[in-house]
Amino acid sequence: MTQPFIIPLLLLVNSVYGQKALELKPGDTLKYSLKSKKQEWITVHSDNANVAVGLFMDGKKIKEQDGSRGIKSVERLFYTPEKGKKYELKVWAKSYVEKTKPSIISITESKTVPILDGQLTSTQFVEDLRVFRSIREKANSGLYVYRSKQQIDSLYKKAEEEAANSKNIFDFYKVIAKVTGFEGSCHNYTDLPNHASYYLTQKPEYLPITLKNIDGHLLQDSKDNTIPLAAEIISINGIPAKEIINRFSRYYFSDGFSMPYRETTGFERGMLDKFYIEFGTHQQYSIKYQWNGQTHEVALPGISLDAFKKLQESRHSLTLDKKLMAEKYSLTKEGDKVYRLSVRGFDFATGKEDPAYNKFSAFLEQMMGTLEREKITSLIIDLRGNTGGTGALYEKVFTYLTQRPFRDSHYAYTWFNEVPMEERLVITPLFLSNGVKDKQGINAYLKQLYPKQTQGKYYWADDKNPLILPNERTFKGQLYLLVDQRVASAASHLASLIKSYTNAIVIGKETVGGYYEHNGHLPLVYELPNTGIQTGFSIVHVIQDAQNLPDQKKGQGIIPHYEIQLTRQEFLDQTDVYLKKALELQKQHNQ
């Protein structure tokens, strides 16, 4: 008989104030008045739900946090009270397993926090891997799209050996992340039950620099550091930069075989946790780097996790990115007879009934009015950083760029219309926000969308995939499409349509989202029984409405006609090389 994943009772050690055995029902919110008048850690532990916490000062929310994935979740906040202010903590369930019951919550205020240790056995790791595989084989329609059954069998055989040899939850997480990425879907995720930093040391043993991967070269990304900004890192503690990039890429997932996102995003998003899962923390870091044609080596002491967070949040490369991502969508004039439509996400509206959709539609109409009035001959579509969202939004954009009718997909299917392995199913915030609280609600939704079975597949209902007509006003000039490795889901779907059916010149990096097909539409999340690790994937395989192109192979993202590469000086100057290239091509086109 397997033991449940145990959150250590050490969480309650050194507590000054707190409250145990609070009952939290789904849909309810717990309130707790903070007692301490000094700087303290607040720890919230749940035994049967993933919880979020909000910190309020005099009735106004000053912080909200949901850092843990698992049902047995822990949330930690560092609390610095101001004199004369009243502080309150609110706790509510974000998700829970399908067979839910009230969750028992404990809240503590303490000066220090211990390291979490799950105390699991190799037998439990192997059992979780087998449950993980069973979930994939019963629910994931993307399992054999890019890999044969023989390849999957071979991978799991090796993974089971590695799981049996795992000493702790990090060892097992490395195994299961590798298996997740092998499938080939950017909608896949597998994550620890609690934020990785909770398992890590509180000592000052964190990397004293930040890193940026530019075309396979690791550059030093911190200002005012011993190592010059933009110096190329050759190795850290003897590990070559190429090996760091390769090992770090295992924690990030893409459609098919696309690699740019996997190799770059960890240095932007994973340095606070996954870097240390893979490479550990150290009292001292020996860093070899190249600067002005010479190789140097320096030994730097580790820094605290809080100091590293501040370093990561102030890194040099964020300057341009913050500027790019300042607005969800915008129209800007970039030169003579050229405008740029920037859309950084399709998550600002839930569908056509959302007022934000109507506002966006009005914006696009105003855009066309401007382009027509000024007789604009070139339009740049800038999708960089757009990770997707609502299909209705990307479809709306394309109606202004095409002269041909189109569909969301040629066809789309799932392997079921009744959820398998519901005992491990997590009812996520996505379902809860749509009033779905159990598997019956999910099954009803699936039967509506995927009613008919043909040869073991349930296909998307015809009335849910209508022919979409071009707008009466469409742009007929020259298009330039800017994409980077972050473009995914609905955004990469739009990019595939633009590349496939317009005159667009594509500039940038291969996208993480696929050109021909992807798994999308509806994500399901399951929790493994022993570790509490959660794994999710989109269950619907979508064959996109994109024509075969000679430069697009199965398993690739959208391949640019002009691939962008950044020089060290452009990195230092924070030059927008994507836009610069588009304007150069536009100028040549008009000569």
Image (cartoon, rainbow, N blue to C red):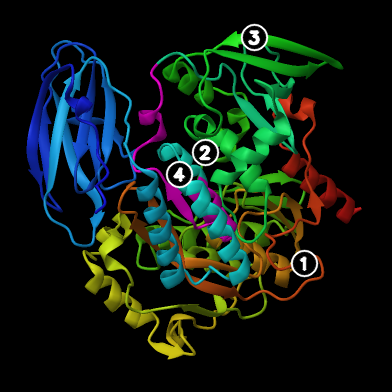
Q: Are marks 1 and 2 in contact (CB under 8 Å)?
A: no
**Residue of label 1:** 503
Q: Judging from the image, what secondary structure is the residue with disc 2 in?
A: loop
Mark 3 or mark 4, which is nearer the start of the sequence?
4
**15 sits to left or right of 163:** left
Mark 3 or mark 1, which is nearer the start of the sequence?
3
- Please tell me whether mark 4 or mark 3 is closer to you in this view: 4
Distance between mark 4 and mark 3 Cα atoms = 31 Å
Quadrant for the N terminus, please.
Answer: bottom left
**Residue of label 3:** 299
Disc marking residue 224? none
Distance between mark 1 and mark 2 Cα atoms = 28 Å
- Please tell me whether mark 2 or mark 4 is closer to you in this view: 4
**Quadrant assignment, res 109:** top left
Distance between mark 2 and mark 4 Cα atoms = 38 Å
Mark 1 or mark 4, which is nearer the start of the sequence?
4
Q: Residues within 10 Å of mark 2 (few under 14, many from 20)?
A: few
**Quadrant assignment, res 229:** top right
**387 sits to left or right of 86:** right
Up/down of 430 relative to 246, above or below = below
